[in-house]
Image (spheres, rainbow, N blue to C red):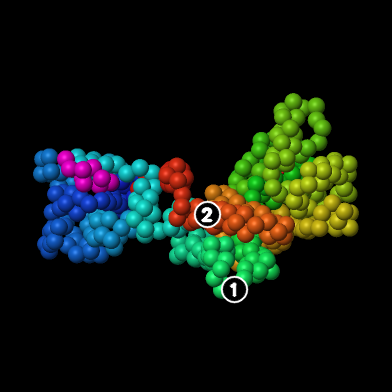
Amino acid sequence: MTEATMNTICAVSTPLAEGGLAVIRISGSDAIAVADRIFIPFGGKRARDMDGYTCAYGKIADPNDGHTVDDVMLTIFRAPHSYTGEDTAEISCHGGIYLTKKILRICLDCGCRLADRGEFTKRAFLNGKLSLTQAESVMDIISAQGESALRSARLTREGRLFREISQVRQSIVAMLGSLAAWVDYPEEDLPEVSSENLLSGITAAETALEKLLARYDCGMLLKSGVDTVIAGKPNVGKSTLMNLLLGYDRSIVSEVAGTTRDVVQESVRLGELVLRLSDTAGIRVSDDTVEKIGVDLARKRINDCALVIAVFDGSLPLDEEDTQLLEYVNSLGKNLIAVINKSDKGQAVTEDQLEKYTGYIASVSAANGEGAEEIERLCRKIFSLENYDADSDVFANERQKKCAENALAYLKAAKNSVALGDTLDAVTVILDRAADSLLELTGEKTSDAVIDEVFSKFCVGK
Ligand code: GDP
């Protein structure tokens, strides 16, 4: 077995589940030779004679016994024109679990190594096909749960974030260049680096990063969803509302007060936003042991969540238990939507009564299927999604955000340093660090440990 073969990796790139098709991917300098050994074309060329970006129909035969395993399509990519930048073969076979594993086993028998998590994308990064931010966006494309998240991941994949960060970095490098020239060749007739120029340059870089950071929270919300608790007294219609939002029946809806004892969890999509809903018991004080457990759980969930949808029976006047809930949520400073439910049964609760607790109030009739749109509108308002532009760049994860925050902190420190009249040398050192943080963000100057960490979050086969 040659070293080239050992460096050739293979993996099943589709989920290991029964399906119409599965794809086994082989990448590395021996990929085409391996494909050539196991693939017998029904006509046309053998793998080794195929051009890049072409496919052929044929069968996979087990080199051990010559038996046919499956009829497949083989696609060949030749370096550097492939995802990884290496020679690559992709075998599309029938999507059976046993079958797919068997073809993978045959590739391994031919000397390929099983790919690590994200190793194909890691190779793409190491071969300069993708920046680190682009590589990370591949993961986001796979996990995107909505149109905005997908669009934003695609833009990053296309390199927009990378370019935007590079521009900021270049502006810092330009400042560093003038500083270096000024410091190193004071006798030359160079334009003076004035503190005004420096400050305005640093401020511009700062503003660009601050804008990107501000969009991050919106992006994260769209990506990960909002932990939401539907709270309220028994029988106000929490389960009915949850079912309305879900669009189908999940939890028990009954006439007996206090039946929603378990915390039921579901994800619901309201437009672009995914709410992870928990329908809880009320938070009233109770002697019933089982209900007490539910109440404790409800309080805990309210503590942990990002949004509370407090439900009230609009046909009955607010009572102490209702106001206790509102006060409890307010005391925790949680985002709060007050829902006056059962609007079809007459109005004993008015918006005025709730306004001191929240500016987000919806009058709904969950039983009649009315109210989801209004709740969606309020959610968009609370989380400032109305002006969110899915076509703008946004950091994909905490790693990227942290690098940008570091760069921003250095820029602020550099500004301080200029204002304090420090030496230009001192300012240079700080600006250098700001530029380095941005290089770390894009992966142009990153330790192996960081790279390993990034790719360890990928799935095998990507
Ligand atoms: P929960 O204990 O808060 O989860 O309340 P449920 O969802 O189980 O609802 C309690 C009762 O109120 C059920 O009989 C529902 O059919 C009824 N209900 C829920 N929403 C409405 C509504 O908008 N209008 C009317 N008239 N009844 C409702």
Q: Give the amino acid type for the residue marked by disc 2 in the picture.
A: Asp
Q: Quadrant of the N terminus?
A: top left
Residue 250 locus on image (x, y percent): 60, 45
Mark 1 highlights which residue? Answer: 191
| Residue at the image point whose x is 25% and y is 47% from the top | 8
* Span of residues in magenta: 1-9
C-alpha span from label 2 to label 1: 26 Å
Check disc 1 and report its element: helix, strand or loop.
Answer: loop
Tag 2 near tag 1, CB within 8 Å: no
- Give neighbour class at mark 1: few <14, some 14-19, many 20+ (Cα, 10 Å): few
Q: Can residue 379 be seen at all in this image of the molecule?
A: no
Q: Give the amino acid type for the residue marked by disc 1 in the picture.
A: Pro
| Residue at the image point whose x is 46% and y is 49% from the top | 446
Q: Compared to 219, does 233 lie above or below?
A: above
Q: Can residue 65 be seen at all in this image of the molecule?
A: yes
Mark 2 highlights which residue? Answer: 436
Check disc 2 and report its element: helix, strand or loop.
Answer: helix
Tell whether position 3 is magenta. yes
- Give neighbour class at mark 2: few <14, some 14-19, many 20+ (Cα, 10 Å): some
Q: Compared to 32, does 205 lie above or below?
A: below
Residue 460 locus on image (x, y percent): 37, 45
